[in-house]
Amino acid sequence: VQLQASGGGLVQAGGSLRLSCAAPRRAFSDYAMAWFRQAPGKDREFVAGINRRGIATEYSDSVQGRFTISKESARHTFYLQMNSLKPEDTAVYFCAARRQILTDTRVRTLEYDSWGPGTQVTVSS
């Protein structure tokens, strides 16, 4: 499934940004969704995810309490609201998706197989 992320930019520490990821309407309700990020010289890491039904969410320890993942069916779009941003949040952020059966609540351990192009988030100190 084709994904399109947007919303990155430059922000000062303590500021907020909201990333968006649009998915095809036909696939939106069938997929679990997650955000990953990759900083220069580091491996890609899981940031946050939401299962197909939108009832299970998971966050990495580094963003827990600051970031919120959500989905809006009417716009077939997923969001990552990022508050209290820190310089260490600077990275390229990617949205990812994986078709999921209705009863599956996994998020972090899914093998995501659809990826959107990244969007740069830069947090200045």
Image (tube, rainbow, N blue to C red):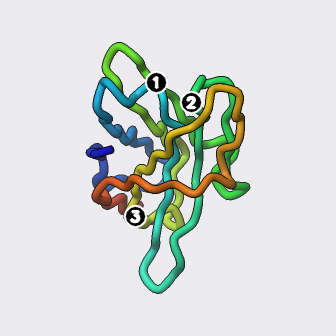
Figure quadrant of residue 53: top right
What residue is drawn where x is 52% and y is 46%? 34
Badge 2 element: loop
Badge 3 element: strand
Spatial CA span between label 1 and label 2: 6 Å
Q: Residues within 10 Å of mark 3 (few under 14, many from 20)?
A: some
Q: Is residue 64 left or right of residue 92?
A: right
Mark 3 or mark 1, whichever is nearer to me: 1
Instruction: Residue type at mark 3: give it.
Output: Ser
Can you identify the residue that label 1 sits on?
Answer: 29
Q: Residue 93's x, y, as percent?
A: 40, 58
What residue is drawn where x is 50% and y is 61%? 89
Q: Residue 52 bears which disc, if any?
A: 2
Spatial CA span between label 3 and label 1: 36 Å
Q: Quadrant of the C terminus?
A: bottom left
Instruction: Residue type at mark 2: give it.
Output: Arg
Q: Is residue 97 left or right of residue 119?
A: right
Q: Is residue 69 left or right of residue 22?
A: right
Of the image marks 2 and 3, the number of the one nearer the N terminus: 2
Mark 2 or mark 3, whichever is nearer to me: 2
Q: Are marks 1 and 2 in contact (CB under 8 Å)?
A: yes
Can you identify the residue that label 3 sits on?
Answer: 124
Q: Residue 5's x, y, as percent?
A: 30, 46
Spatial CA span between label 2 and label 3: 34 Å
What residue is drawn where x is 69% and y is 46%? 64
Decide which of 98, 14 is in the foreground and name it: 98
Q: Residue 62 bears which disc, if any?
A: none
Badge 1 element: loop
What residue is drawn where x is 28% and y is 32%? 24
